[in-house]
Image (tube, rainbow, N blue to C red):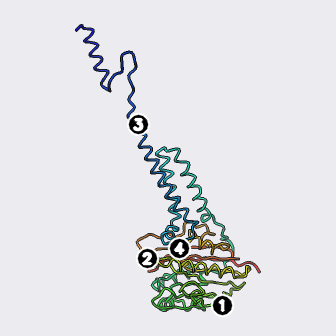
Amino acid sequence: MTVQEAARGHLDSDDGHGGPSGPPGEPAESSTWEPAGRRPRGRWVDVVIGVVLLGLVAVGALRWYDSTAYVVVVLQTAGPFVVIGLGLLAVATLVLRRWWMLVPVVVALVVAATVAAPAFRATSSPKADRDLTVMSANVWIGAANAGQLMDAVRFHSVDVLVLTEATPAILRRLDAEGAADYFSQREGVARASTYTGTMVLSRYPLSVRSLGTDPALEGTRSVQPEVDVTVPNGTVRLKVAHPTAPLRGDTVEWRAGLRALQSWKQRLDGDELLVMAGDFNAGFGHPGFRDLAAGLDDAQRIDGQGWVRTWPFAGNRLPAFVQLDHLLSRGLTVVEAGQVALNRADHAAVWASYALPAR
């Protein structure tokens, strides 16, 4: 072996430690195993993003599916989580640089945000004079803290207090906290050891149109009184709402209760001043509630409070995530609205102040 051959062999051995060299006279093949390995991983990322996107879109689309299937009714309360989920998915898609998947994710996010946006747009009139303040509280079969409730009543200068799941015991505790002196009028039916009792307490005169005790007419076993509230510059018709909760096995009755309230609303004179107050056991994710609320103002939405959560509070490991308690009105101007959480109550109370039209 000559010196030149030995040197050539040494150089060849150094050049070949990244892989086999090509034939003499041709360039060595470049290594392509890394990009080839990345492409399958990228495809799997796209598949995961697509599956999550389809799942969120499917849950969001249930908003337009009027059903009494228990799973559907529950998933229809998940609208805010769909918006949050789509927002997080858009961020993840952007960080992972899956550009072609970003387009459908952003489109879905824009649609969901457009649906949610009206709840964040305030159209209330905080400078208007307050003629009537209504509060609705589900007192959890009379278990709610009466002292806290009366504190809230005084703080917000409540004129009419609607109590769903009212019992004789909660009325006695409220009276001990000063309710008998604060409210001069009361109508309704309080029932012990059941969720079906309802009472209306008022500082203004009440005229009963119906106690709402006929389940066949009301579509629910709960009492749903209908009264006229005479305030200094007008009369407001008040209807209490408390449809059956959509628990497993009760969703058909729940839907019937919402339908009965809608039928009641449609029978009214279109010029009457109206407030519907109570625990509707439904929210804007349910088509039945949106049908009922059509043409009415939800006080919390008019006040631009966004994602309002009134259930569940006490007695549930879940954080509050859905608004089931509402104040719907017609012909009145919403001045201000809010919520109050109470100890030993699974619902937050909702309240709203209204201005009546000038006579």
Residue receiving disc 1: 209
Q: Secondary structure at mark 3?
A: helix
Mark 3, other Cα within 10 Å: few <14 / some 14–19 / many ≥20: few
Residue 111, position as x, y percentages in the image: 59, 57
Decide if residue 128 is in sight here: yes
Residue 4, position as x, y percentages in the image: 27, 8
Mark 2, other Cα within 10 Å: few <14 / some 14–19 / many ≥20: some
Mark 1, other Cα within 10 Å: few <14 / some 14–19 / many ≥20: few
- The vertical placement of 157 against 22, above or below, is below
Decide which of tag 2 and tag 1 comes sooner along the chain: 1
Decide which of tag 3 and tag 4 comes sooner along the chain: 3
Q: Quadrant of the C terminus?
A: bottom right
Residue occupying the far left of the picture: 1
Q: Secondary structure at mark 4?
A: loop
Mark number displayed over residue 314: 2
Could you give the CA–CA distance between mark 2 and mark 4, rounded to whole angstroms? 27 Å
Mark number displayed over residue 36: 3
Q: Which amino acid, by three-letter code, is at mark 1?
A: Arg
Q: Which amino acid, by three-letter code, is at mark 2?
A: Ala
Q: Nearer the viewer, mark 2 or mark 1?
A: 1
Residue receiving disc 4: 68
Q: Quadrant of the N terminus?
A: top left
Mark number displayed over residue 355: none
Decide which of tag 1 and tag 3 comes sooner along the chain: 3
Could you give the CA–CA distance between mark 3 and mark 2, rounded to whole angstroms? 55 Å
Could you give the CA–CA distance between mark 1 and mark 3, rounded to whole angstroms? 77 Å
Could you give the CA–CA distance between mark 1 and mark 4, rounded to whole angstroms? 31 Å
